[in-house]
Image (spheres, rainbow, N blue to C red):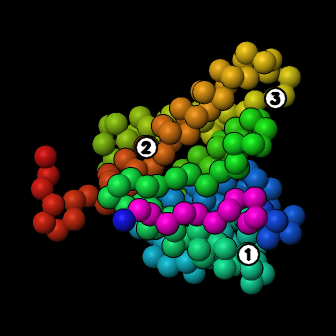
Amino acid sequence: MSAPSLPDFEHTLQLSGGRLDAPELAECHGLLCGLVCRESSRTAGDYLKQLSAMQLVVSPDRALHAALAQVWQSTVDQLEDEELGFRLWLPDDEEPLEQRTAALAHWCSGFLAGLGSAGQVDVLSAEAREAIADLQEIARAELSPSDQDQQAGEDDETAYAEIVEYVRVVALLMREDFRGPKGGEAIH
């Protein structure tokens, strides 16, 4: 069984009625993923309260509230998926690379905030702590339109895709580090 898809990113942006831009919406998902990894978001309501506390989404209307609740459920299911069906919620590949890069940076920032929300992270493996340092660097990433020429654009697209995959794997690693083995699972 495959994990459920996340709601359409662009449609959810439209539902925000201009109250969120793409990087902020990506940050909302990063925060959610960090909270779920730390088991600090046991319900969609917990997540929405955290979004409000961080001033990311305050008093969403019914449609945006429903979309964010669906994001919560889909993300929880994806992170539990044995087939590793977890995906980052980012702008579509048709969007300009600089917008996607900014969104990825904000996703990482939100993820780090979610991880830190439940206290210290010293329980993590050395590999996970190194990955956090990498995410801190990615959270500072930016790409201006003037940085691109045709060849560099193709190279940048490839690099972007590789970084997104790395961040996805790091999120799964964090989930496992914080979760630990479930009852009956062997530790190798």
Q: Position of residue 183 (x, y in %)?
A: 17, 68
Compared with residue 95, is residue 19 higher up or lower down, i.e. above or below?
Answer: below
Picture residue at 44% right of the left edge, 63% below the top = 3
Amino acid type, mark 3:
Ser
Residue range highlighted in magenta: 2-12
Amino acid type, mark 1:
Leu
Dot 2, crowdedness within 10 Å: few (<14), some or many (≥20)? Answer: some
In the picture as drawn, the residue positioned furthest to the bottom comes out as: 62
Per the rendering, the mark at residue 169 is: 2
Compared with residue 102, is residue 82 higher up or lower down, i.e. above or below?
Answer: below
Picture residue at 78% right of the left edge, 18% below the top = 150
**Foreground of the two, 164 or 124:** 164
Dot 3, crowdedness within 10 Å: few (<14), some or many (≥20)? Answer: few
Dot 1 falls on a residue whose secondary structure is helix
Return the disc, 1 or 3, that comes first in the chain's sequence: 1
Return the disc, 2 or 3, that comes first in the chain's sequence: 3
Would you say 14 lies left or right of 73 here?
Answer: right
In three-dimensional space, the C-alpha distance between marks 2 and 3, rounded to whole angstroms, equals 26 Å
